[in-house]
């Protein structure tokens, strides 16, 4: 049975899950009736200074594999239709060069479309899986009111004293039309 986390909760990921080497981060969402939106899951690969290690330290729908090959995005789901995870990102904790891994959700609006705010979605959930067994370890419900947000920092993994820690962040990251740009501006060197 997976453990449900709350905003701000921190756990010792590798201590509570000995031998854990591979993760999957699953994101699912539904649209409110009569509305459409494209949400995207992205990963920012951060160094010890809390900034992107390199210019290409992002994994998202347009760059699906990290520079070190340790993080892979399943591809873009533009509607959130269907059951289960809409987008999945796989992480090899042994292979990654990251000091921190930040998972972000952002909305995408076409050029002639108004900003897509999170107030248009429901049932947004993050699931953290053991990447080798596909067992759901943790869930994090993103139901907090983020009605005017276009990007959100969901969860953060970070190395501390030789182990991986996990933080259920759940913080607004941007409100501009392209929420992913807000996060890029915050974490770029």
Image (cartoon, rainbow, N blue to C red):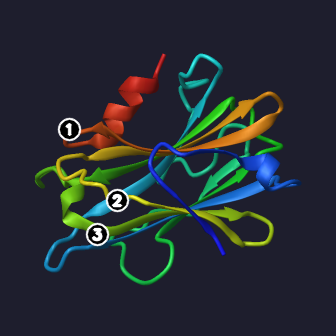
Q: Earlier in the sequence, mark 2 or mark 3?
A: 2
- Picture layout, residue 57 above or below residue 127: above
Residue 98 placement, left or right of 108: right
Quadrant of residue 139 in the image? bottom right
- Judging depth in this view, the residue of 62 and 132 nearest the camera is 132
Identify the residue at image location x=55%, y=25%: 52
The reply to whether discs 1 and 2 touch (Cβ–Cβ < 8 Å) is no
Residue 25 visible here = yes
Q: Is residue 22 above or below residue 86?
A: above
Classify mark 3: helix, strand or loop.
strand
Label 2 vs label 3, nearer the camera? 3
Q: Which residue is disc 1 drawn over? A: 176
Taking 62 as reference, is 142 left or right? Answer: left
Residue that extends furthest to the right in the rendered view of this protein: 19
**Between 43 and 121, the one nearer to me in the picture:** 121
| Cβ atoms under marks 2 and 3 closer than 8 Å | no
Q: Residue furthest bottom?
A: 82
Q: Which residue is mark 2?
A: 39
Distance between mark 1 and mark 3 Cα atoms: 20 Å
Distance between mark 2 and mark 3 Cα atoms: 12 Å
Q: Residue at x 63, y 33 (%)?
A: 100
Q: Residues within 10 Å of mark 3 (few under 14, many from 20)?
A: some
Q: Secondary structure at mark 2?
A: strand
Percent across and percent down for residue 71 are 67, 48
Spot occupied by residue 132 in the image (x, y as percentages of width and height):
80, 66
- Rendered residue at 20%/38% (across/down): 176
Residue 122 - label = 3
Going from N to C along the chain, the mark reached first, 1 or 2, is 2
Give the mark nearer the N terminus: 1 vs 3: 3
- Decide if residue 143 is on the left or right side of residue 12: left
Q: Secondary structure at mark 1?
A: loop
């Amino acid at each position: 049975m997976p453990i449900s986390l709350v905003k701000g909760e921190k756990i010792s990921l590798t201590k509570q899950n000995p031998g854990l080497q591979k993760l999957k981060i699953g994101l699912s969402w539904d649209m409110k009736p009569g509305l459409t939106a494209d949400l995207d899951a992205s990963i920012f690969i951060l160094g010890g200074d809390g900034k992107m290690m390199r210019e290409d330290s992002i994994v998202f729908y347009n760059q699906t594999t990290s520079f070190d090959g340790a993080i892979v995005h399943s591809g873009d789901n533009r509607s959130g239709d269907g059951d289960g995870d809409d987008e999945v990102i796989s992480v090899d904790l042994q292979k990654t060069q990251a000091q921190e891994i930040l998972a972000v959700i952002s909305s995408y609006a076409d050029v002639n479309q108004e900003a897509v705010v999170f107030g248009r979605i429901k049932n947004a959930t993050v699931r953290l899986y053991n990447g080798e067994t596909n067992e759901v370890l943790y869930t994090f419900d993103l139901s907090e009111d983020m009605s005017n947000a276009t990007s959100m920092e969901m969860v953060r993994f970070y190395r501390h004293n030789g182990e991986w820690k996990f933080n259920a962040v759940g913080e607004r990251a941007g409100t501009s039309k392209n929420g992913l740009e807000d996060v890029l501006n915050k974490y770029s060197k």
